[in-house]
Amino acid sequence: MLKHVVMDKLSTLRHPVEQELAAYKELFDLALAHEDDFLGQALNYVRQRQGKMMRPILVLLMAKELGEVCKNSLRSAVTLELLHTASLVHDDVVDESGERRGQRSVNAVYDNKVAVLVGDYLLSASLLKAAETGHIRVVEIISRLGGTLSEGEISQLANIRREAITEEAYFHIIHHKTAALFAACAELGAISAGGDEQYVARARRFGEIIGECFQIRDDIFDYFDSTEIGKPTGNDMAEGKLTLPVIFALNDTNDSSMIELAYKVKNRTATSGEISRLVAFAKDNGGIDYAKKRMEDFHLDCMNYIDEQVSSKEIKDSLKCYLDYVIQRKK
């Protein structure tokens, strides 16, 4: 039943921009077309693994709230999705991951060398599409975002090596990865439709909070088994990453044996059995409930923004469905 509810929300949130999404998809596919056989095959593999287009939808909804979606709104959506896709391809190499969204990653199908080069090509395509908007500000935002995403990945690697296990470090990483990407989506949607500086700044903060919700929901997935998600329980810990549920449980209980186990996770010396113990510990000591509470607090902030800042009833309803989908989705 819940699955049908979630799918209904997905249809509802897309409804105001269905036609624009079709135009976006055509532009995105064109950006991934290439005459070289080998590169063309790799890019086609990337294209076939597209998700639910949550980020492009956000760009288009934020633009449509201010009027009609223009060509630069579509270009902005494409450039952000190309950059996001590049970051995923590179992340899979860094994380030595063989799967992405339940399918084999680019580095698994080809190899790390090809994956890095495909990611580089996508970065170049993203900047080219940004330049096509004719606005230096768009190019600057995309360029800075590329650097921010890289900083976030480096911070995550550095955090694995640090002794401290804190929420502050966790949210610092989120702000330089998922939250930064969603913030740029809302920001560029507003800019492309001619929003004033105050509107753009509020839109950016709105997108940032959505990104925080999105990442916390993603991290909660890791504490439960699901073939839909495309990764086993405890996969983040297997990569040395400690996320919000276990960070809370460790700091709330100050359990010395579990803290010792957490350091083994950070050093990537924990066995699968030890990771399972730490996952169970987080769940048994309020970690999931705490993460959901933080996510719900962010969700409320976003709802307040929609009620106060969005005038179109259709866009208002769509954005509320968007938020509900973010926290209710199953993958």
Image (cartoon, rainbow, N blue to C red):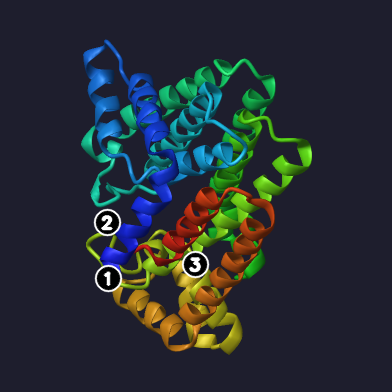
In the rendered image of this protein, does residue 161 appear above or below residue 109? below
Q: Position of residue 280 (x, y in %)?
A: 37, 83
Please report contact status of discs 1 and 3: CB closer than 8 Å, yes or no: no
Q: What element does badge 2 sit on?
A: loop
On the image, numbered disc 3 is attached to which residue? 242
The numbered disc on residue 230 is 2
Structural distance between the alpha carbons of marks 1 and 3 = 17 Å
Q: Residue at point 50% right, 25% down? A: 75
Q: Position of residue 270 (x, y in %)?
A: 38, 70
Locate residue 164 relative to residue 104 in the image: left or right: right
User: Given the image, on which type of amino acid does mark 3 rest?
Assistant: Leu
Q: Nearer the viewer, mark 3 or mark 2?
A: 2
- The extreme front residue here reads 313
User: Given the image, on which type of amino acid does mark 1 rest?
Assistant: Asp
The numbered disc on residue 40 is none
User: Given the image, on which type of amino acid does mark 2 rest?
Assistant: Gly
Mark 2 burial class by Cα count in 10 Å: few <14, some 14-19, many 20+: some
Q: Please tell me in which quadrant of the rendered image residue 53 appears.
A: top left
On the image, numbered disc 1 is attached to which residue? 225
In the rendered image of this protein, does residue 306 appear above or below residue 31? below
| 1 or 2: tag closer to the N-terminus | 1
Structural distance between the alpha carbons of marks 1 and 2 = 10 Å
Please report contact status of discs 3 and 2: CB closer than 8 Å, yes or no: no
Q: Residue at point 42% right, 69% down? A: 220
